[in-house]
Image: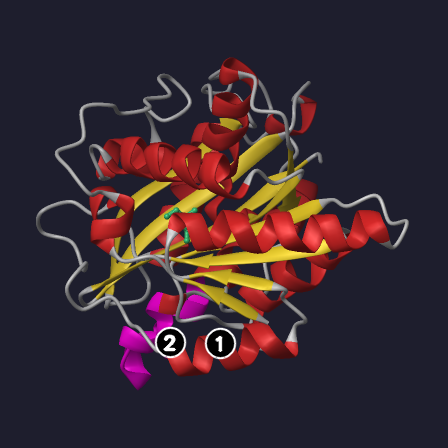
């Protein structure tokens, strides 16, 4: 596994592998998994999926410009040695590990902003977050030049925003959304789960349980509207005293437009996302479920 810490080393690594594969009669393709490190099984599933391509590239970069001033940039968990071990086990060919100075060497005067799709959910709660995500992802796409880029659906809005950017700016690559990976008890995997104390972690299970309960709810109450479902989910989540809701929303996916207010949800003509963001102590967790997919 090649470890590249500069942009030129990163590009050279992929170019060399491509040339070797062409010489061996292989048509090369590059699969890319962008991450902020502290890798877990969810990332491992993306790295394994990227093996669909002949060359797999992982980036590990805690991107400062996607964190707000009162967010967890300084305490974001990091463990380079463990990350490299997992990447190697997953068969990654190249790991790109830039520093902040490598990614942002001078005062930046360009920002990529996707409007509308980024306006609600995490975009509303974390102003500027998606500008930071799309700006760094556009830079990474230009550095790595992938054919396919793999993203987890736990950050479903991120997938929708990046797909919109790719469409609008004609990036020549395919975005591959990958399923949410969960602990056995249902908690969606996240690097931030390490922040949770035992009691918070126990109560956080209400998120996946609430999402799981939706099928039975819609079967028992077929006239439920999006607003009704939001109310029921809010009531379920607030049975846990440590849960402080940021948002519970039911929107069309991937447009992230609101559902018609008085239409029974089961009659929806489009795919729908039920998206949750809830604080447990100092930790903000997100989870979601697509309906009528
Ligand atoms: O999902 C993440 O880990 C980050 O938002 C990403 C896509 C690596 C950009 O920093």
Q: Are marks 1 and 2 in contact (CB under 8 Å)?
A: yes
Residue drawn at x 40%, y 48% as measured from the top left: 7
Residue drawn at x 55%, y 68% as measured from the top left: 2
Q: Answer left or right for 264 relative to 277.
A: right
Q: Which image quarter is the C terminus in?
A: top right
Q: Badge 2, how many Cα within 10 Å: few under 14, some, many 20+?
A: few
**Stretch of the chain drawn in magenta:** 192-206
Q: Secondary structure at mark 2?
A: helix
Q: Find residue 204 and report its horizontal and vertical position in percent.
A: 38, 68
Q: Which mark is residue 80?
A: 2
> Residue 261 or 58: which is nearer the viewer?
58
Residue 188 vertical placement versus 245 (above, below): below
Q: Secondary structure at mark 1?
A: helix
Q: Find residue 197 and report its horizontal and vertical position in percent.
A: 27, 82
Mark 1, residue position: 84
> Residue 19 or 87: which is nearer the viewer?
19
């Amino acid at each position: 596994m090649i470890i590249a810490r500069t942009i030129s080393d990163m590009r050279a690594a992929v170019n060399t592998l491509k040339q070797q594969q062409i010489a061996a009669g292989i048509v090369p393709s590059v699969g890319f998994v962008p991450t902020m490190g502290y890798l877990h099984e969810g990332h491992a599933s993306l790295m394994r999926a990227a093996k669909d391509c002949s060359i797999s590239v992982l980036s590990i970069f805690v991107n400062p410009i996607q964190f707000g001033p009162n967010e967890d940039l300084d305490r974001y968990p990091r463990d380079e040695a463990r990350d490299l071990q997992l990447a190697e086990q997953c068969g990654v060919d190249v790991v790109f590990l830039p520093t902040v100075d490598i990614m942002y060497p001078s005062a930046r005067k360009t920002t990529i902003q996707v409007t509308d799709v980024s306006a609600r959910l995490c975009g509303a709660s974390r102003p500027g977050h998606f500008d930071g995500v799309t700006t760094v992802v556009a830079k990474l796409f230009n550095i790595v030049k992938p054919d396919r880029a793999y993203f987890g659906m736990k950050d479903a809005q991120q997938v929708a925003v990046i797909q919109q950017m790719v469409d609008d700016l004609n990036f020549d690559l395919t975005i591959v959304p990958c399923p949410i990976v969960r602990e056995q008890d249902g908690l969606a995997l996240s690097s931030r789960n390490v922040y949770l104390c035992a009691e918070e972690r126990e109560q956080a299970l209400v998120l996946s349980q609430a999402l799981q309960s939706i099928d039975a709810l819609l079967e028992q109450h077929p006239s439920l509207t999006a607003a009704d479902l939001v109310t029921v989910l809010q009531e379920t989540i607030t049975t846990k005293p440590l849960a402080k809701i940021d948002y519970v929303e039911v929107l069309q996916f991937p447009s992230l437009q609101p559902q018609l207010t008085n239409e029974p949800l089961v009659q929806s003509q489009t795919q729908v996302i039920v998206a949750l963001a809830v604080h447990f102590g100092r930790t903000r967790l997100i989870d979601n479920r697509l309906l009528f997919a």
